[in-house]
Amino acid sequence: EPEVTQTPSHQVTQMGQEVILRCVPISNHLYFYWYRQILGQKVEFLVSFYNNEISEKSEIFDDQFSVERPDGSNFTLKIRSTKLEDSAMYFCARDGTGGVNYGYTFGSGTRLTVV
Amino acid sequence: LAKTTQPISMDSYEGQEVNITCSHNNIATNDYITWYQQFPSQGPRFIIQGYKTKVTNEVASLFIPADRKSSTLSLPRVSLSDTAVYYCLVGERNTGGFKTIFGAGTRLFVKA
């Protein structure tokens, strides 16, 4: 099963700038997710995405965040005006393949550093 | 969502079998138990999933008692590369938009 690919692997941005994190899951999967992990802390759910719509989001996912699947392949997370506390690893994930494996497949992540 | 409780950390030596137990007293009828592994600066990786009794794959075994209020991940003959954080999660199997919630996990240290 091909992996989930995330780009860039590392991004440094100035506070207040917009960033777009990209993910390339497999197009025949239905559900996609974004998670983040602040250094030394646990993995936190941000948002789930189904059929080009947000199906569920956490309290973290406020108006500064948005998700899109603009071309049916790429899946993006946009942070409109970054804050220092947005510095974290951001992981994209897709749903399982069915059968005996119903776990999510996570990408390798984008390390976002806001300065 | 059922809450899970697992040890914060565990130590082991190479070649030993490691058992990590997770408590989930409020597990619901439709809930499955899923374990993930995470290395530093990497995304979580699915290890195993089960509903009841025992599940085994090429990586690990998962033991679930009849009451399903706990589960034990068993890693046979660990190596240094098994040093990682292991997460126990409980929830419905990939229903639409289900927000898999990660707890703090168990940090496993494998020593030579």
Image: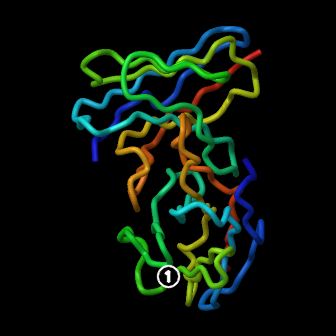
Report whether A46 appears left or right of A80: left
Give the camera-side residue of A22 and B58.
B58
Report whether A52 appears left or right of B16: left
Q: Which residue is the extreme one toward the top?
A: B16
Which subunit holds the residue at mark 1? A
Question: Residue B21 occupies which quadrant of the picture?
Answer: top left
Scheme of colours in the image? rainbow
Give coordinates of residue B85: x percent, y percent: 58, 36
The residue wearing badge 1 is: A65
Give coordinates of residue A10: x percent, y percent: 76, 68
Identify the residue at horizontal 60%, vertical 37% (top origin).
Answer: B37
Give the camera-side residue of B92 and B45.
B92
Q: Note whether A104 is above or below A34 in the view shown.
A: above
Identify the residue at horizontal 45%, vertical 78% (top origin).
Answer: A53
Report whether A114 appears left or right of B70: right
Q: In the picture, which quadrant includes the C terminus of chain A? A: bottom right
Q: Note whether A42 is above or below A17 in the view shown.
A: above
Identify the residue at horizontal 47%, vertical 58% (top origin).
Answer: A44
Identify the residue at horizontal 50%, vertical 50% (top origin).
Answer: A42
Residue kind at label 1, given as amino acid type: Phe
Report whether A14 appears left or right of B5: right
